[in-house]
């Protein structure tokens, strides 16, 4: 299986980032060579940046380095971001890259609540594009309508299910203003606090799509699967 990002990713929300290169000249980029992943900013200096991530599930940690420096309020070590890049070697192998674009990934913190405290997980509708686990993170890609940035893009643990074999998680998305323009938006949430419990066998994720509320089950045995609302994996 492989992750398939939408072609419109150049519309990613890039708020708060600056990008510079230490190279004297930049080589032309073939946009067909650009790949995208949700990663963690592991280290940054004026001379470059290091990113880490896992492809799927508990696959080996991958380290990507570039001589390009990132700046801005969102460029914090530990921050989850979406990057578009061209690897100097093979994809999904540690090595050096040419960073093309970097964008915010909302979340990181898993919130806790109940149906009562969240108005029954009130959310504006969206299209779920992808849902997958990468190490301790649950990554979510939506196609949603909003103007500047979402007023909320959160992942809630239903606290009444926290000690169950399959704790229930709810994706809550709310746009900022009424808009007909849809774009890609990513969230990445640390679920280790429940995933690492001895009682946990997996998580059930609920999302309020344009087709109504649907759910997907991610288990520890099949945690590398990427599911769509139809519950069919992306091939």
Image: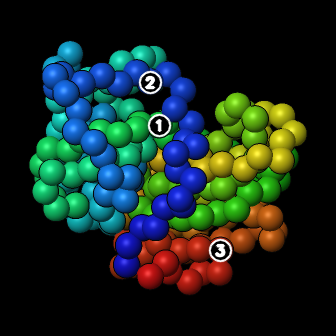
User: Looking at the image, which residue is at 53% across and 59% down?
Assistant: 7
User: Quadrant location of residue 229?
Assistant: bottom right
**Which numbered disc, 2 or 1, marks the residue that appears first in the sequence?**
2
Circle 1 Cα neighbour tier, 10 Å, few/some/many (<14 / 14–19 / ≥20): many
User: Looking at the image, which residue is at 80% across and 64% down?
Assistant: 210
Q: In the picture, which quadrant includes the N terminus?
A: bottom left
Return the residue nearer the eye: 155 or 90: 90
Which residue is denoted by mark 3 in the rendering?
229
Q: In the picture, which quadrant includes the C terminus?
A: bottom left
Tell me the mark number nearer the camera, choosing from 3 and 2: 2
User: Quadrant location of residue 23?
Assistant: top left
Task: Assign a secondary structure to mark 3.
Answer: loop
Estimate the x, y position of residue 203 in percent, counting from the top left: 52, 66
In the image, which disc is placed on residue 17? 2
User: Looking at the image, which residue is at 33% across and 65% down?
Assistant: 56
Tell me the mark number nearer the camera, choosing from 3 and 1: 1
């Amino acid at each position: 299986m492989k992750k398939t990002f939408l072609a419109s990713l150049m519309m990613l929300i890039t708020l708060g980032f600056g990008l510079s290169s230490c190279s004297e000249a930049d080589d032309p980029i073939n946009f067909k060579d650009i790949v995208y992943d949700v990663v963690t900013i592991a280290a940054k200096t004026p001379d470059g940046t290091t990113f880490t991530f896992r492809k799927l599930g508990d696959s080996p940690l991958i380290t990507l380095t570039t001589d390009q420096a990132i700046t801005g309020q969102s460029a914090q070590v530990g921050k989850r971001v979406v990057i578009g890049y061209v690897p100097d070697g093979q994809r999904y192998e540690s090595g050096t890259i040419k960073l093309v674009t970097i964008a915010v990934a909302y979340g990181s913190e898993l919130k806790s609540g109940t149906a009562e405290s969240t108005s029954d997980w009130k959310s504006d509708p969206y299209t779920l594009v992808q849902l997958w686990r990468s190490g301790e993170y649950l990554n979510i890609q939506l196609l949603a309508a909003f103007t500047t940035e979402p007023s909320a893009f959160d992942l809630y643990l239903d606290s009444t299910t926290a000690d169950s074999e399959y704790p229930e998680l709810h994706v809550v998305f709310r746009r900022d203003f009424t808009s007909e323009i849809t774009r890609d938006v990513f969230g990445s949430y640390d679920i280790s606090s429940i995933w690492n419990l001895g009682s946990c066998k997996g998580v059930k994720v609920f999302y309020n799509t344009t087709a109504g509320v649907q759910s997907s089950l991610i288990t520890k045995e099949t945690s590398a699967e990427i599911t769509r609302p139809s519950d069919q994996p992306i091939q």
